[in-house]
Image (cartoon, rainbow, N blue to C red):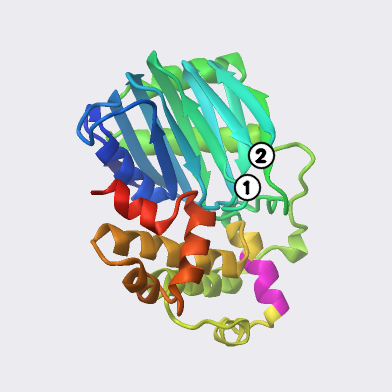
Amino acid sequence: MPQQERLATPEITPFSLAQLGQRFGIHYRIEGPTSPRQPVATGHVHDVSLRHGIHLTLSDLQVERGYTSTSYQSVPWFLSVILEGTIHLQMGKQQIQLSAGDGVCSHFDARHPLTVHQPVQTRLRTVNIAVLTTAPLGLPTPPDASCLHCWKLPKALCETLCTISEQPPTLWRQALVWQGLALQLIGLGLPERLTALPEQKRLSTRDRHCLTALHSRIAQHPAEPYSLTALAKEAAMSPSSLRQKFRACYGCTLFDYIRQVRLQQGYEALQRGESVQQAAHHCGYRHASNFSSAFKRHFGFSPHERNRSSL
């Protein structure tokens, strides 16, 4: 059964944004001075985990203070459509503005993060889709470089999304409706020049099972001293095959994923009050300096800055 969860209260504060950011690898910056409990926006954000590795977020907000979100955590594909309001996106030197009826499809990682600015506005409604794995749907593997592709929603689909988004997303039938709509948006939003894997090269059921088990083990024990040879042996694949298949399935390299999980664990250790040295050792780094450098590349700010901001 798809998992549905309300992520935020009607008042969205810097504190609740920080909680969201911790879960999804997003760093938020709010315009002007503000307190941790002062509302940045009012409204609702609903989080729905669908089948086939699709994660859907419905957002309906009145933005009272402009804020910027920078996403570092890689997923194979991320899509966003605007039902009402305006947002500004930046990836590298590319900058675009989206308004009602516009959609964007992107692939990003810690080296090429996606930055989104939400200006002050009376209503901002968006549908965001994270494709967590390409294998179940036979989707194309994202390119090695970052990708930002804009597109226009068909008018009829946009009207349907507006109507369905007004209904309570916690109703059981809504998960079925959103599953179908999410697949439509993925099909329409992916860049046309991509090439799906040929049938003979697609991941087998056994491959997917082994990769899922490996992905889960790394998520639970990121600090272990992993090596490609040992991981390949565990997955019963050659090292080159594991590299290729892991990226095809999850949209990032195996060791980029290990780094992401380790740094997220380090972030959580800092949040619990551990020192930078303790957090580094906790997530598998031998030297605090290496941890600090990797942390800043990933999150855009240093562990010391993170600790100071929580005081």
Callout 2 touching callout 1 (CB < 8 Å): yes
Which quadrant of the view contains residue 40? top left
Crowding near pointer 2: few (<14 within 10 Å), some, many (20+)?
few
- For the residues labelled 2 and 1, the Cα–Cα distance comes to 7 Å
Which quadrant of the view contains residue 271? bottom left
The answer to whether residue 7 of the structure is visible from this angle is no
Residue at 56% x, 15% y is 156
Crowding near pointer 1: few (<14 within 10 Å), some, many (20+)?
some
Residue 48 left/right relative to 193:
left
Q: Secondary structure at mark 1?
A: loop
Q: Which residues are magenta?
A: 240-246
Residue 54 left/right relative to 194:
left
Residue 74 left/right relative to 55:
right
Residue 115 horizontal/vertical position (percent): 54, 36
For badge 1, the amino acid type reads His
Residue 238 horizontal/vertical position (percent): 69, 83
Residue at 32% x, 73% y is 278
Instruction: Compare residues 99 and 53 and report the one nearer the observer.
Output: 99
* Residue 288 versus residue 196 in the image, above or below: below
What residue would you read off at disc 1? 112
What residue would you read off at disc 2? 92
Instruction: Compare residues 179 and 101 and report the one nearer the observer.
Output: 101
Residue 72 left/right relative to 220:
right
* Residue 145 versus residue 135 in the image, above or below: above
Residue at 32% x, 19% y is 64
Q: Secondary structure at mark 2?
A: loop
* Residue 7 versus residue 84 in the image, above or below: below
The answer to whether residue 237 of the structure is visible from this angle is yes
For badge 2, the amino acid type reads Gly
